[in-house]
Image: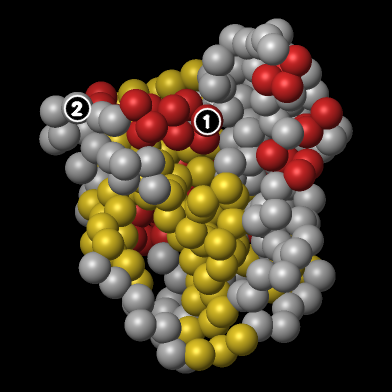
Amino acid sequence: MRQHLSFAFLIVLSTLSGRLNAANPDWNYSNQNWGALTGTATPAPLNYPYAECAIGATQAPVDIATTKTERILNGLTVNWQSFPADFYNTGYAIQVQPYAGDLNAGTLKIGKDVYPLTQLHVHAPGEHSVNGALYSAEIHFVHVRDDGRLAVLGVFVTLANASNAEFQKILDNMPNTPTIATHNKSSVVFNPKKLLPPGNGRFFTYSGSLTTPPCSAGVNWYIYETPLAISPGQLDQLVKFYNGNNRQIQPLKGRTLVKNK
């Protein structure tokens, strides 16, 4: 277990859980004009804590349409491992994270860089679109280094006849208290690898941002091409927690999406 966390790391964790500090305004998915929301900070420019959501040049999510396919030197190596889980209803999404501060959930290796897995959460419908179409849901595996650098691995979710047993653990153990941040610290052992889709490991990658306020840039996104399958019944359970917790598609603004061969 790590003995300490950097300040940047703690800020990122707070942001991803949807609660940064009391001075920042509440936000929701119904009105996504987040950049115009004002807080209580002074001087005046700081009264717009989510300005990046409106003016940022590398915002996420984006539409995956025309992509450049090339050989990517920095491949992905998923070294996640099972962990005792805390099932956390953030008020914006359902989230799974290691229990009781145990951050040893494994890592994502990108080239020579190693990013610890800190949590995963689910959006329904999905956030990234493919040629304008959204998947039923999308899982984001969030990896944060001590220096604050982020890498998010996204997995699309589609429907099939068979259910996914690991996904069912999330549905069965998640506190059913939307809009209120509640934990369900448990002894349930969760294996994030069982939420990886089948296939050849092809992925899309681009430079983006957080998809929730404050929409901070500097997030390396990796989206698997092949989706994970869950059952229609599991989707019905999922949307009873949150339905519509997806950010609108953002313009590329000159960025290039790359797909590995």
Task: Report the residue at 68% width, 20% height from top.
Answer: 46
Split into 4 quadrants, where in the image is the N terminus?
Answer: top left
> Image quarter for residue 146?
top left
Tell me how far mark 2 sits from mark 1, CA to CA.
Answer: 19 Å
> Image quarter for residue 190?
top left
**Residue type at the position of mark 2:** His
Q: Give the class, few, some or many, for how many residues have Cα within 10 Å of label 1's Cα (few <14, many ≥20).
A: some
Tell me the tag on residue 102: none
Which secondary structure lies at badge 1? Answer: helix
In this rendering, position of residue 218 left or right of residue 96 = right
Name the spot of residue 237 as percent of width and height, x first.
63, 43
Name the spot of residue 151 as percent of width and height, x first.
43, 55
Of residues 80 and 222, the one nearer the viewer is 222
Up/down of 88 relative to 209, above or below: above
**Residue type at the position of mark 1:** Thr
Of residues 39 and 105, the one nearer the viewer is 39
Name the spot of residue 112 as percent of width and height, x first.
24, 68
On the question of residue 10 being in view, the answer is yes
Q: How is the image coloured?
A: secondary structure
Up/down of 49 relative to 124, above or below: above
Of residues 142 and 91, the one nearer the viewer is 142
Task: Report the residue at 32% width, 67% height from top.
Answer: 110
Up/down of 55 relative to 51, above or below: below
Tell me the tag on residue 15: 1
Name the spot of residue 20 as percent of width and height, x first.
54, 22
On the question of residue 169 being in view, the answer is no
Nearer-N-terminus badge (2/1): 2
Which secondary structure lies at badge 2? Answer: loop
Identify the residue position indicated by label 2 in the image.
4
In this rendering, position of residue 139 left or right of residue 103 = right
Task: Report the residue at 21% width, 33% height from top.
Answer: 102
Number of labels in the image equals: 2
